[in-house]
Image (cartoon, helix red, strand yellow):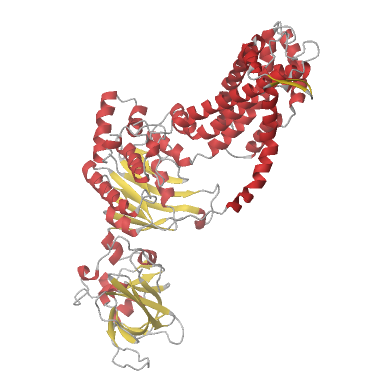
Amino acid sequence: MQRTHNNRAWWLVLPVVIVVAFSAIIPMMTVVNYSVQDIFDPSTRFFVGTEWYREILRDERLHDSLIRQFVYSFAVLAIEIPLGIAVALSMPRKGFMVSLCMILLALPLLIPWNVVGTIWQIIGREDIGLYGWALGQLGIDYNYASNPADAWVTVLVMDVWHWTSLVALLCYSGLRAIPDVYYQAARIDRASPWAVFRYIQLPKLKSVLLIGIMLRFMDSFMIYTEPFVLTGGGPGTTTTFLSQTLTQMAIGQFDLGRAAAFSLIYFLIILLVSWLFYTAMTHQDSDDA
Amino acid sequence: MAEIHLNDLAHSYLAAPTADSDYAIRRMNHVWQQGGAYALLGPSGCGKSTLLNIISGLLAPSEGEVRFDDRVVNRLPPEERNIAQVFQFPVVYDTMTVFDNLAFPLRNQRQPEHKVQSRVREIAQVLELEDLLTRRASNLTADEKQKVSMGRGLVRDDVAAILFDEPLTVIDPHLKWKLRRKLKQIHEQFNITMVYVTHDQLEASTFADKIAVMYEGRIVQFGTPRELFEDPAHTFVGYFIGSPGMNLASITLESQGVRLGTGEDAPLLHLPRALLATLAERKGELKLGIRPEFVELEASDSSSAAAVPDTREHWLSGQVTLVQDLGTYKVVDLDIGGGCLFKARIEEDALLPTGRVRLRLPARWQRFYLDEHLLDLSQAGAPDSGEADSFARGESGGPVRGEDDQRPGGNA
């Protein structure tokens, strides 16, 4: 078949190319540009090749930060995903309670990150904070400012408080989309509640869970504001996560070359892990027969 | 194994029903015998699915009782009744293989694994699913999925009845026929009571030994396909079964016969005196019904347009307004006056009538309805059974028709 080629059609693509160039490609290439040069001032710059990357990959501080980041993100997922599903399952199906639950769940999502940090910073204090004081009264020695374990627990609880709602709302919408006939068939097949969850609800929730897991992974992997406000990354560096390390490097030390190399690696890690999640969860669809 | 009794059963979705129309199922008594193949036929919204869900226990009836043999099961949930149900949209457990799907009800009952294995393989063989056993259920076609849902009902050996809720709706036409035949075979092989809900008369009559026709929350007739065709107990059955439906006209009694329809040109159908006398005893709205298959046409001798009333008994005259060729037969629309439009179904090779024609309504096939319900005139001797009748069943096609035969909703 003969195809007609008209090169003027490229003009139609131009607006998109311009938008994408300014929003993504140019900023990204700027970072790439920084990452391969050592810049002292606008006229004094040296091409250094992969030196920054090699340094970054050997940096002990970054290794620690990266490990902390992974532990944190996986802890967040391990708590928020099952908890979100549980909340969604226990929500009412109809009546005015539905709206009430939705509003209550949506509230934490509407609070700005630094406000969340401030709230938990105050509420966790043992002198004037409700939780901190209550724990003290129960005889538990709790101090998020000096005890690394306490700081970790507080940062995690704060994230769970802030973001479990998102998973719960996603799952709730997913559950509502399951036709009643599946539950009816399950009753006739005498399925136990566990079997209903395992073979009907969970499979049907897969697509929303995929979105939930990806969002929560990416978000928690880039977490900055909340721990920064709550603990400032301390005590010591025990709650200093990747983005805070990066910020210190880029703005605190004005080490733009290394920070740029770091940013790109950071970006690639998120891309890679998200791809892994996606592939792992969608792979099961194929027939193994 | 069980006989399913519905005693004084009624159901309303409203909390405090008052009027008849508040009920989805109006008070009814019915028995489904053990081992029968039944169809529940009716238009959308007549309460078929409600009735089915009450039998399976997905819905608790607001009044009356459901009994399986001697056991009242009203308040028993579906898991405690020996019932399987197949739904309109095939339900399979996506993440499981076909084998695990079929084994699911047995494993839920904690049956020993060797029994599960043998039972699943047996059913898979019956349903011709053997080659698919290791396949993931989500990758099946609609008809395969529907077979899997049927299979989950069949594997259980405690099932007394299987209820089908329009199970072939989403299946391709050429596969419908195969699946329906499969169902019939399974019914013969397993001696299970089957109740099959559908709005398709063809599906109902090919599957079932007896059909219950539902209309506005009631079973208006329960009978064989032939009974539904020949003696519709309710005008709705006459209208709903058959293709096209029964010709119906309201009638008023006169000394010579009955006048059909209303208006100045309402035709007079001459009838025997004995019949008129019997009809005169009934108080209420009377209707005459006759199947289009049984209306005989004869070209009018007066070729002019002048409408000469026919004074012979059982004869009318009418004007042909439309002839539809439906392949194996033709449907002739006839304006007989009085606002009545009658249809006659004639064989494909029959001579095509045009203009004015004479219609004979054989007494044997005339049916009279009082307030929409069939009048039993058998003792009145009116539709004389002795009349020579050229409309033997085989000749006129009978109630079971071709595969693609959809009923157009026309009647008088």
Instruction: Tell me which corner region of the image, top left, top right, bottom left or bottom right, holds residue A182.
Output: top left
Q: Is B352 positioned to the left or the right of A174 in the image?
A: left
Is residue A81 depicted above or below B68 in this figure? above
Q: Which residue is drawn at 67% across and 10% down?
A: A61
Q: Is B158 positioned to the left or the right of A125 in the image?
A: left
Instruction: Tell me which corner region of the image, top left, top right, bottom left or bottom right, holds residue B18.
Output: bottom right
Query: Looking at the image, can residue A205 be seen?
Result: no
**In-front residue for pair A95/A118:** A118
Q: Is A109 positioned to the left or the right of B375 in the image?
A: right
Counting from the top left corner in percent of width and height, residue A114 is at 76, 24
Q: Is B126 positioned to the left or the right of A101 in the image?
A: left
Counting from the top left corner in percent of width and height, residue A94 is at 59, 39
Query: Looking at the image, can residue A195 be seen?
Result: yes
**In-front residue for pair B266/A119:** A119
Is residue B345 depicted above or below B44 in this figure? below
Counting from the top left corner in percent of width and height, residue B38 is at 30, 51
